[in-house]
Amino acid sequence: MDSLGSLQAFVQAADARSFTIAGHKLGVSSSAVGKAIARLEERLGVRLFHRSTRTMTLTPEGELLLERCRRIFAEVEAAELELAQTRGAPRGKLRVSMPIVGMLMMPALTAFMRAHPAIELELDFTDRLVDVIEEGFDAVVRAGEIDDSRLMSRALGTFHLLLVGAPAYFAKAGTPREPGDLLEHACLQHRFATNGKLERWPLRRGRKDLDLELPTTAVANTIEPLIEMATQGLGIACLPDFAIRRQLREGTLVTVLDRHVHHAGVFRLLWPSSRYVSPKLRVFVDFMARHLFGSRERQP
């Protein structure tokens, strides 16, 4: 009977998106509804709601349970068994927000899909700062530090920006020896899609950062066109190392001004904070941490 009571509280809260309204309908306090759902989440071993100060949304596991409960309460035991089994066999939809540069992470993502065919991966590529909880994402991948107490975080690996160009370009235009030499070169620049600003090239002379007004031979708001233009010998680009490993290995791109370029960034995977991490999210986090940057050393 306690199980049925918890499920009833869950259904009311899911319909109203509010513990307070659910409590009014059931004739109990919002605290009692919250405790009943907490007991239900603990028993099932899954998280049913994403909660924030303003909204409450169902997780995919919550949607599955709600559908079962609405159909017939007599199937409660079957629903509990099905959800319990997901702990041993990760499955279901996994919504992940990736930065636009994440298109270059597709080898790791496709490897994950092959390793876990029962997980339906839904990818949203954008550079805007999404609200993980309110927009219903299971996880997001972003560069840099994210200060949000509602989220858990795990570093996936470090990356570095490099100045690169094609050997044919340097044979024609000469190789820059000092940062100031870039003023006489064709510079292929990246514009942030979120704020419209050009990305600053991380140039330094000694310990002093340099902020040069570089030529803008071409500008793109994604990385792939810059890689292609640089490879075709159209100029120098500032690109993340993980995006051009093949070109560097094959020699179609070479680096310049290495001692004057200082940059290190971190890609992080973030997900809603909870005592319960769904099996599909757990395997995704672990897989990406192992495979995104290969065997390179990762930051904790």
Image: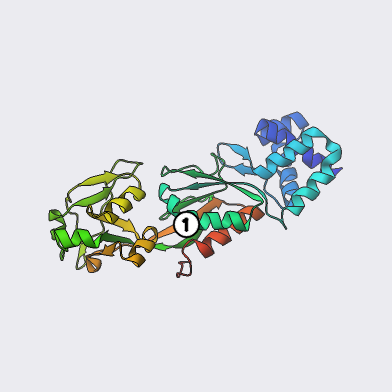
The N terminus, quarter of image: top right
**Residue drawn at x 73%, y 33% as measured from the top left:** 12
Q: Is residue 31 visible?
A: no
Residue marked by disc 1: 268
Which corner quadrant of the image does residue 284 belong to?
Answer: bottom right
Which corner quadrant of the image does residue 74 belong to?
Answer: top right
The percent coordinates of residue 175 (x first, y second) are 17, 64
Identity, as a three-letter code, of the amino acid under mark 1: Arg
The percent coordinates of residue 146 (x first, y second) are 44, 52
**Residue drawn at x 61%, y 38% as measured from the top left:** 56
Q: Is residue 63 visible?
A: yes
**In the image: residue 268, left or right of residue 83:** left
Q: Is residue 33 above or below residue 159?
A: above
Q: What kind of element bears circle 1? A: strand
**In the image: residue 169, left or right of residue 54:** left
**In the image: residue 249, left or right of residue 208:** right
**Residue drawn at x 39%, y 61% as measured from the top left:** 242
